[in-house]
Amino acid sequence: MRSVQTDDKWSVVDDRAKRGRVDLIAIQTDGAASSGATRDSDVPGRVHLTPTQRKVLDGVHSGRLNKQIAFDLGVAEATVKAHMTILMRKLNVRNRTQVAVVAQMISAGL
């Protein structure tokens, strides 16, 4: 695969998605079966999410607001914002829309 500049990354994802060929990162949550790796860096392309981060990701996928996700989880809205910031870093995306796109691709099994 050719080297992709950060600005071009999402256009490449869109192009591949249209052709049905999306290479997506693997998501591992706490309690999930592990390949024996102890750190995220041990498995290329793998992102480790805590159960709460996974619930926030599911809320974003459902189109819920931070305030609604916070209510559902019984935490402060600021806590959800902090989880969103961490999710964006881990998923290497820039905004909430891109988080939702990644969540959709994960749920679709792409």
Image (cartoon, rainbow, N blue to C red):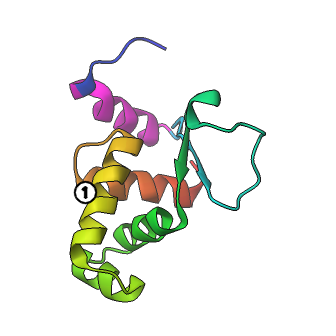
- Of the pair 107 and 19, the residue shown nearer to us: 107
Residue 58 in percent (x, y) is at: 45, 69
Q: Which residue is found at the position 30% from the left and 42% from the top?
A: 93
Q: Tell whether 58 sits left or right of 43.
A: left
Residue 18 in percent (x, y) is at: 42, 41
- Of the pair 85 and 23, the residue shown nearer to us: 85
What secondary structure is the stretch in magenta mostly built from? helix
- Is 71 situated above or below 65? below
Query: What residue is shown with label 1?
Result: 96
- Is 14 situated above or below 7? below
For the record, the magenta segment spans 7-19
- Is 107 situated above or below 35? below
Residue 35 in percent (x, y) is at: 77, 40
Amino acid under label 1? Arg
**Residue lying furthest top in this view?**
2
Q: Which residue is found at the position 40% from the left and 43% from the top?
A: 90
Residue 60 in percent (x, y) is at: 35, 68
Q: Tell whether 81 sits left or right of 91.
A: left
